[in-house]
Amino acid sequence: MNNIIEKLSALFEQLPGVGPRQAKRFVYALIDKNDNFVKNLSSLVLELKTKINRCSLCFYTFTGSDTASEKCSFCENLNRDKNILMVVQKEIDLENIEKSKCHNGKYFVLGGAISLLKPEAIKNIRMRELFYRVKNDAYLKELTIAMNADKEGEATVLYIEKIMEPFIKSRELKVTRFGKGLQSGAEIEYADIDTLQNAFLNRR
Ligand SMILES: [Zn+2]
């Protein structure tokens, strides 16, 4: 692969939801953009890696003027309910749930769901970190799991319920499923405000 167009297309293809044709479209669109656009894009992409922090508690990524800060605003906010922790697959899901204002507790970003095709990829999501978070969080009374209403989401919920078993007994931790209120196949990222509010109210 020696052509710059091919090389850049191959990079775009590694982004979620981008196929080979879309990747090529991006490259040709960039060729037509002015110098300023391209300079801006490349410097912002570089900044992403230097100015974005990942919260040490919930793993949400955030931009901070203070790069030394280790915790995001959700974890730092004393007005949020520390008795309830919501597990989400990814940042975009968290942001959509925030828009619906249904949940005023804390979050945990798992970083994905269990893949049925690649079960070994479970090591790429933060199950161990979730276990330790719950284990060390003395305030926690309810863990609510907000996964997409698909097979991967269901497998992830079952797995979390299983690893939480010791806490359910010893600490009377309640584990609820947010997904009961979602229609089959629904994705948290695209769910509307009413759907999310219902899913939260009907969690069990
Ligand atoms: Zn956080």
Image (cartoon, grey):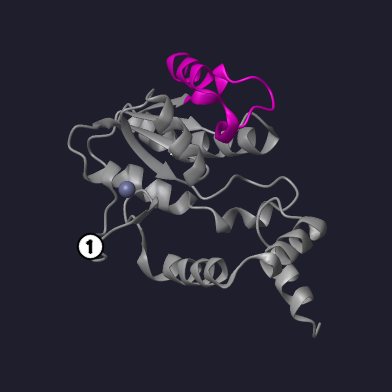
Magenta region includes residue 48 = no
Q: Position of residue 59 (x, y in %)?
A: 39, 52
Asked which quadrant contains residue 184, the reply is top right
SS label for mark 1: loop
Horizontal arrangement in the rendering, residue 1 relative to residue 72 (left or right): right
Q: Nearer the viewer, residue 105 or 101?
A: 101
Observer able to see residue 13: no
Q: Which residue is drawn at 29% across and 58% down?
A: 64
Q: Where is residue 166 in the image (x, y as percent from the top left)?
A: 40, 37
Q: Residue furthest bottom?
A: 2
Q: Residue at x 57, y 70 (%)?
A: 38
* Residue denoted by label 1: 66
Horizontal arrangement in the rendering, residue 173 relative to residue 31 (left or right): left
Q: Where is residue 83 in the image (x, y as percent from the top left)?
A: 27, 30
Q: Residue furthest left?
A: 78
In the image, residue 175 sits, relative to residue 121, either above or below, namely: above
What amino acid is found at the position of numbered circle 1 in the picture? Asp
Q: Where is residue 136 in the image (x, y as percent from the top left)?
A: 28, 46
Asked which quadrant contains residue 105, the reply is top left
Q: Nearer the viewer, residue 176 or 12?
A: 12
Q: Residues within 10 Å of mark 1 (few under 14, many from 20)?
A: few
What stretch of residues is rendered in magenta?
177-204
Magenta region includes residue 179 = yes
Observer able to see residue 17: yes
Asked which quadrant contains residue 98, the reply is top left
